[in-house]
């Protein structure tokens, strides 16, 4: 979702630096971008400050920055916009300026009461050039600034008027100062050398310049000027000191290397990531297992792909530990708040740790007194910091919009916890180590070729279906998400047994149907469902440890018992990737989608 990066320091190429940083946030998904840089040029012998603004529709990735004539500047900010209020136009792109660029802002999130505020501003003769809530926010800050002439105070007063979740960055032509504030949308401050500071929505934006960061919490603001960075707790209205955190991953981990896309790189990373994910402190895993054991109801909560992982989790806990675990999508969880009380355990599962729906569900659970646990990939993310206990997925930065390696890392950790709940962590670890090593063998060039050949056969179909049973049912749903996201083929996932209750009417001659098969007690049943589809003309793609008569195309996966959802989803990820390429789609930045969905 929208990317934010700003710099204030002693260097004079601030505009270029923030645009380079913005390129590193491309993976978040966006439709337009813009930059603002504060300049001080001599006009008639007098230093005259101004703000240069440049905005564009489309992607910044291919742009050669030297083609842009950027001014000298020590203070700049840039933004990539994922449209919410108003279409994809240059006028709606950020930065937005208020009168004579006294106030220039970029923003992530939504100012929910913007219409109300806009009416008030129109009465006071403010004019609008865009349809965005951001421009409204710029004018609100300006109206406060007009009253007091103090930028910091103006931002403080304006923030009190906004409802919703957001992250703001504010600058003014009149002050060599950068102000950032957050409520709900992530903002991280990077501390460079010689008084240089960066503020961004994600670390890759400034990782090339520093590995020291400070996390802004909700209802906090930072003011950066020549005297350094001052942090304010907006609720308590007092200054706070922030802890400096060292980033341990290096820049290469967040680069494509020899791969043509992040998506395939991250799929191939799964040769190592399962292994890394289960390399956890056993004491921590046992502590979590005990917390689940003792809890008055455990809720696994996530969104999208991660929501499907949570569903797999509930099957795993039932199979392995004979424990009932509740599962909810983040956006639906608040409907079940009535069942949460002191003693309940809320487990937020998330790659980014920033997904607004999951974060809000977590806040709801906290209010009701539940214990909070986070299973996240991004250390220091909002969910990590809100949780009482965190477990890290250790998948490394995931940049392709479509989640792959974080998905399997999450499943591996949930499997391990389920075994720990059953008092058998050793067996769980052994199974997962074997699985990791079998995935390493499986992900070879021949395997990818075999799947590419299938993609060539089916690339022009209109619809496809994925079926599974038991713990592979949520993976059928996830397989469909992967296909939808990057191939744009209409795809749906079903529980194998549900087909005959309606969806089988959709099968016509040649319709591809992927059957996710495990060598378990449901094998014969899912094969029967595949036979039912074949009898209606369906083209059966079997993802299975063994070849079966019903399969028209077989993709072999290792026989790994309870780790079957982990291995079964990988060939579907590869298929989705190759379908995307064959259909000339960009698998890393699919249309309409964004990484890290920070709006509700
Ligand atoms: C799909 C995908 C999304 C995310 C969802 C939650 O490939 O990545 O469905 O799973 O937006 O994101 P996180 O896990 O960051 O909370």
Image (cartoon, grey):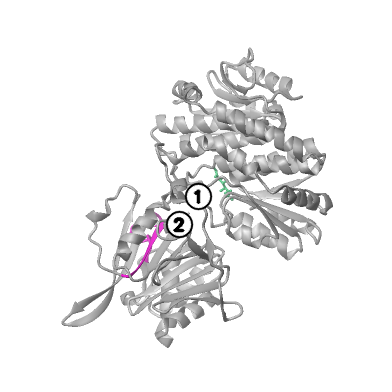
Disc 2 crowd, CA 10 A, few/some/many (<14, 14-19, 20+): many
Work out whether residue 236 can be spotted.
yes
Residue 592 % position (x, y): 46, 46
Work out whether residue 89 can be spotted.
no
Residue 438 % position (x, y): 61, 28
The earlier-in-sequence mark between 1 and 2 is 2
Q: Image check: 330 left or right of 220?
A: right
Number of marks in the rendered image:
2
The residue depicted at 65 percent of the width and 62 percent of the height is 386
Considering only vertical position in the picture, is 336 above or below 71? above
Q: Quadrant of residue 278?
A: top right
Residue at disc 2, secondary structure: loop
Q: Image check: 57 left or right of 132?
A: left
Q: Are marks 1 and 2 in contact (CB under 8 Å)?
A: no
Q: Which residue is mark 2?
A: 2
**Cα–Cα span, label 1 and label 2:** 9 Å
Q: Quadrant of residue 160?
A: bottom right
Cβ of mark 2 under 8 Å from ligand 1: the answer is: no
Disc 1 crowd, CA 10 A, few/some/many (<14, 14-19, 20+): many
Considering only vertical position in the picture, is 360 above or below 119? above
Cβ of mark 1 under 8 Å from ligand 1: the answer is: yes
Considering only vertical position in the picture, is 445 above or below 351? above
The residue depicted at 79 percent of the width and 39 percent of the height is 424
**Magenta-colored span:** 74-95
On whether residue 85 falls in the magenta region, the answer is yes
Q: Which residue is mark 1?
A: 595
Magenta stretch: dominant secondary structure: loop
On whether residue 528 falls in the magenta region, the answer is no
Considering only vertical position in the picture, is 26 above or below 93? above
Residue 163 % position (x, y): 56, 70
The residue depicted at 66 percent of the width and 18 percent of the height is 532
């Amino acid at each position: 979702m929208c990317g934010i990066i700003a710099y204030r320091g002693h260097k004079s190429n601030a505009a270029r630096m923030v645009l380079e940083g913005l390129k590193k946030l491309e993976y978040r998904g966006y439709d337009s971008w813009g930059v603002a840089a504060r300049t001080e040029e001599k006009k008639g012998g007098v230093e005259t400050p101004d703000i240069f603004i440049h905005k564009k529709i489309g992607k910044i990735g291919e742009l050669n920055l030297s083609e842009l004539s950027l001014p000298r500047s020590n203070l700049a900010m840039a933004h990539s916009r994922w449209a919410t209020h108003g279409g994809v136009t240059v006028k709606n792109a950020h930065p937005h300026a208020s009168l004579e660029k006294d106030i220039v802002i970029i923003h992530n999130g939504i100012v929910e009461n913007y219409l109300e505020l806009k009416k008030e501003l129109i009465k006071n003769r403010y004019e609008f050039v865009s349809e965005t809530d951001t421009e409204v926010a710029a004018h609100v800050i300006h109206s406060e600034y007009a009253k007091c002439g103090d930028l910091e105070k103006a931002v403080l007063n304006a923030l009190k008027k906004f409802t919703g979740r957001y992250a703001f960055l504010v600058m003014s032509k009149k002050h060599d100062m950068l102000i950032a504030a957050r409520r709900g949308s992530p903002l991280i401050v990077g501390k460079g050398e010689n008084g240089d500071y960066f503020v961004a929505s994600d670390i890759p934006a400034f990782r090339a310049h520093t590995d020291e960061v400070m996390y802004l919490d909700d209802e906090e603001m930072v003011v950066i000027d020549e005297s350094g960075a001052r942090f304010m707790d907006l609720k308590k209205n007092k200054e706070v000191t922030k802890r400096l955190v060292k980033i341990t991953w290096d820049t290469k981990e967040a680069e494509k290397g020899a791969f043509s896309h992040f998506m395939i790189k991250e799929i191939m990373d799964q040769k190592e990531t399962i292994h890394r994910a289960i390399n956890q402190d056993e004491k921590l895993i046992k502590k979590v297992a005990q917390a689940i054991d003792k809890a008055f109801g455990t809720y696994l909560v996530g969104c999208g792909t991660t929501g499907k992982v949570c569903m797999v989790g509930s099957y795993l806990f039932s199979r392995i530990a004979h424990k009932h675990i509740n599962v909810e999508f983040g956006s639906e969880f608040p409907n079940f708040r009535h069942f949460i009380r002191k003693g309940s355990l809320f487990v937020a599962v998330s790659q980014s740790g920033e997904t607004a729906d999951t974060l809000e569900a977590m806040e709801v659970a906290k209010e009701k007194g539940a214990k909070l646990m986070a299973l996240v990939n991004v250390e220091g993310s909002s969910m990590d910091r809100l949780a009482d206990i965190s477990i890290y997925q250790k998948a490394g930065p995931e940049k392709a919009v479509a989640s792959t390696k974080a998905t399997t890392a999450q499943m591996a950790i949930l499997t391990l916890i389920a075994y720990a709940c059953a008092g058998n962590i050793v067996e769980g670890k052994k199974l997962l180590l074997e699985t990791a090593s079998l995935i390493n063998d499986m992900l070879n060039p021949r395997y990818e070729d075999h799947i590419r050949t299938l993609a060539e056969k089916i690339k022009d179909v209109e619809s496809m279906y994925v079926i599974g049973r038991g713990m592979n049912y949520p993976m059928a749903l996830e397989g469909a998400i992967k296909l939808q996201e990057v191939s744009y083929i209409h795809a749906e996932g079903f529980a194998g047994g549900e087909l005959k209750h309606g969806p089988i009417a959709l099968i016509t001659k040649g319709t591809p149907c992927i059957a996710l098969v495990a060598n378990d007690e449901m094998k014969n049943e899912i094969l029967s469902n595949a036979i039912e589809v074949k009898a209606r003309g369906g083209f059966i793609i079997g993802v299975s440890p063994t070849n079966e008569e019903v399969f028209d195309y077989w993709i072999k996966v290792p026989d790994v018992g309870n780790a079957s959802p982990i291995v079964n989803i990988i060939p579907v990820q590869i298929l989705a990737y190759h379908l995307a390429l064959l259909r000339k789609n960009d698998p890393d930045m699919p249309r309409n989608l964004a990484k890290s969905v920070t709006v509700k």
